[in-house]
Image (cartoon, rainbow, N blue to C red):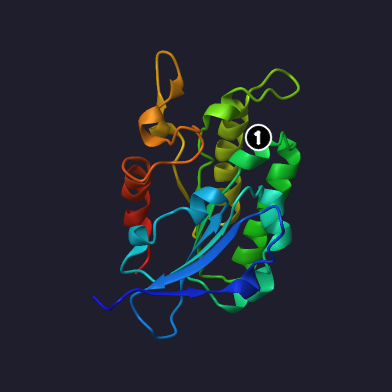
């Protein structure tokens, strides 16, 4: 296996002062090839490079980002010009923490998915489900619904929408249910850091990798 090469692709993301941004490429081949692109917030930024060893991967992680932030801050035309073969989209828990409206979450996500899938006909788009967090359980929306319920609605509704509109290209990875315990329903803290938001590397990212690595495209 050739040595991993890490390079920055700063043109893809316009950083702001209040968002820590990490955009990396991890590849075992110096040739120009189509990359896998994980896109999301801090969980993507903190995703260990070792999780993608052996794959050509460009990570775009913006700490603290909502789906709306990703829509506004990423240069999507520049990203499309790189012709990625696979996108792993993982965002949404910050939208809930900020109590962004469900309709805005959905419209921003659909805009991003449509933008990519219409421009790259053979793109493999993977929606990684919004993860449950400790703080989001206590976020209460109008109507009395908590943040976990909003996460579940988004994961369900966007799965139905994506499969209906892009049956050959739109796929999902459940990164929600594996991090919960039941009777009563609660967070499985084994996988999280003390903030109950970010995953730890010993258990959390190992669990994530067990779900994601099997679907990565060679």
Quick one: which residue is furthest to the top in this view? Answer: 183
Quadrant of the image occupied by residue 81: bottom right
Residue 127 appears in the figure: no
Q: Residues within 10 Å of mark 1 (few under 14, many from 20)?
A: some
Q: Is residue 141 above or below residue 4?
A: above
The N terminus sits in image quarter: bottom left
The C terminus sits in image quarter: bottom left
Q: Is residue 165 left or right of residue 132?
A: right
Q: Nearer the viewer, residue 165 or 145?
A: 145
Q: Is residue 87 above or below residue 136?
A: below
Where residue 157 appears, as percent x and y from the top left, is: 60, 39
Where residue 193 appears, as percent x and y from the top left, is: 43, 36
Where residue 35 appears, as percent x and y from the top left, is: 46, 72
Q: Which residue is mark 1?
A: 97
Q: Residue at x 67, y 40 (%)?
A: 95
Q: Residue at x 52, y 32 (%)?
A: 133
Quadrant of the image occupied by residue 11: bottom right
Disc tally is 1
Quick one: which residue is furthest to the bottom in this view? Answer: 31
Residue 200 appears in the figure: yes
Q: Is residue 77 left or right of residue 87?
A: right
Q: Nearer the viewer, residue 164 or 154?
A: 154
Q: Residue at x 63, y 71 (%)?
A: 12
Where residue 114 appears, as percent x and y from the top left, is: 66, 60
Helix, strand or loop at label 1? It is: helix
Q: Nearer the viewer, residue 73 or 87?
A: 73
């Amino acid at each position: 296996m050739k040595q991993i090469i890490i390079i920055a692709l700063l043109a893809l993301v316009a950083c702001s002062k209040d968002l820590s941004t990490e955009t990396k490429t991890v590849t075992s081949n110096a040739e120009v090839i189509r990359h896998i692109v994980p896109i999301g917030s801090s969980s993507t930024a903190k995703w260990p490079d070792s999780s993608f060893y052996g794959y050509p991967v460009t990570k775009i992680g913006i700490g603290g980002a909502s789906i709306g932030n990703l829509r506004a801050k990423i240069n999507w035309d520049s990203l499309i010009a790189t012709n990625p073969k696979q996108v792993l989209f993982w965002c949404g828990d910050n939208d809930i923490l900020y109590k962004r409206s469900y309709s805005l979450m959905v419209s921003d996500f659909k805009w991003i998915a449509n933008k990519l899938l219409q421009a790259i006909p053979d793109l493999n788009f993977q929606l990684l489900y919004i993860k449950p967090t400790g703080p989001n359980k206590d976020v209460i929306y109008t109507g009395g619904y908590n943040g976990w319920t909003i996460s579940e609605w988004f994961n369900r509704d966007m799965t139905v929408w994506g499969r209906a509109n892009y049956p050959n290209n739109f796929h999902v990875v459940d990164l929600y249910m594996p991090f919960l315990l039941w009777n009563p329903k609660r967070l499985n803290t084994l996988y999280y850091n003390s903030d109950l938001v970010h995953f730890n590397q010993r258990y959390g990212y190992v669990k994530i990798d067990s779900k994601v690595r099997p679907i990565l495209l060679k």
